[in-house]
Image (cartoon, rainbow, N blue to C red):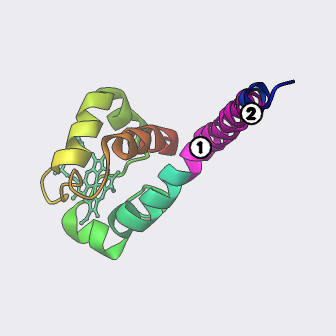
C-alpha cells in the first residue's frame, strides 16, 4: 500500500472507532439519567419542599403548620387538581408557598409533579 493510502485508511478506521465509542457512551449515560429521575425528584423534594411539606408530604412540620401548607397526600384533593395546576403552583407559588421557577428547571418541576402524585395515600 502507498503511504497516503495507509494514512487515509488509519484515519477512517480510527474515525469509525471513535464514533462507536461516543454512541455507546451517550447511550449509557442517557440510560442512567432516566433511571435516576425518580431519585432526583425525591432529593429535590427533601431539600426544597420537605421543610414545609415534610418528607412524607403531609405538611405536619412546624413551618408547614404555621403556613397552612397543604397535605399533599390527600386523595380527594389530588382528584380535584390537574397536573398543570400543580406545575403552576410550584413554579409561581401559591398563597404562602414560595415560587420555584428561579431555582428549579422546568424538567425538575415536571418531575416534582410526578413525585407529588406518588405521595398520594
Ligand atoms: C415555605 C413553605 C413551603 C415550601 C418550602 C413549599 N411549599 Fe408547597 N405549599 C405551601 C403552602 C402554604 C401551600 C398552600 C398554598 C395555598 O393553597 O394557599 C402549599 C401548596 C402546595 C401545593 C398545592 C398547590 C395547589 O395548587 O393547590 C403543592 C403541589 C406544593 N405545595 C408543592 C410543593 C413543592 C413541590 C415544593 C418544593 C419545590 C414546595 N411545595 C415547597 C408551603 C410551602
Residue 1 at least partly seen: yes
**Looking at the image, is mark 2 or mark 1 earlier in the sequence?**
2
Q: Which residue is mark 1?
A: 33
Helix, strand or loop for disc 1: helix
| Label 1 CB sits under 8 Å from any ligand 1 atom | no
Residue nearest the observer in this picture, 71 or 37: 37
Q: Is residue 58 left or right of residue 100?
A: right
Q: Residue at x 64, y 43 (%)?
A: 29
Reading the image, the residue beneath label 2 is 7
Q: CA distance from mark 2 to mark 1?
A: 39 Å
Residue 8, relative to residue 99: is it above or below? above
Front: mark 2 or 1 = 2
Assign a secondary structure to mark 2: helix
Looking at the rendering, the stretch of residues picked out in magenta corresponds to 10-39
Q: Is residue 82 left or right of residue 29?
A: left
Left or right: 97, with 36 as reference point:
left
Which quadrant of the view contains residue 59? bottom left
Picture coordinates of residue 35 (x, y %)? 64, 41
Q: Is residue 46 above or below residue 86?
A: below
Q: Which quadrant holds residue 66?
A: bottom left
Of the pair 19 and 79, the residue shown nearer to us? 19
Q: How far from the left and from the top, in percent, is residue 43?
A: 50, 60
Provide residue 7's location: percent of width, then percent of height.
74, 33
Q: Is residue 108 above or below residue 49?
A: above
- Is 19 on the left-hand or right-hand side of 100? right
Mark 2: C-beta under 8 Å from nearest atom of ligand 1? no
Determine the residue located farthest toward the right in the rendered image: 1
Amino acid at each position: 500500500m502507498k503511504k497516503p493510502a495507509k494514512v487515509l485508511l488509519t484515519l477512517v478506521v480510527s474515525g469509525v472507532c471513535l464514533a462507536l465509542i461516543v454512541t455507546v457512551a451517550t447511550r449509557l449515560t442517557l440510560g442512567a439519567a432516566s433511571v435516576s429521575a425518580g431519585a432526583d425528584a425525591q432529593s429535590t423534594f427533601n431539600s426544597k419542599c420537605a421543610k414545609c411539606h415534610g418528607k412524607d408530604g403531609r405538611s405536619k412540620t412546624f413551618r408547614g403548620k404555621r403556613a397552612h401548607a397543604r397535605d399533599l397526600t390527600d386523595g380527594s384533593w389530588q382528584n380535584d387538581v390537574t397536573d398543570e395546576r400543580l406545575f403552576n403552583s410550584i413554579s409561581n407559588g401559591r398563597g404562602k408557598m414560595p415560587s420555584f421557577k428561579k431555582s428549579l428547571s422546568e424538567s425538575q418541576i415536571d418531575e416534582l409533579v410526578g413525585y407529588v402524585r406518588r405521595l398520594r395515600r
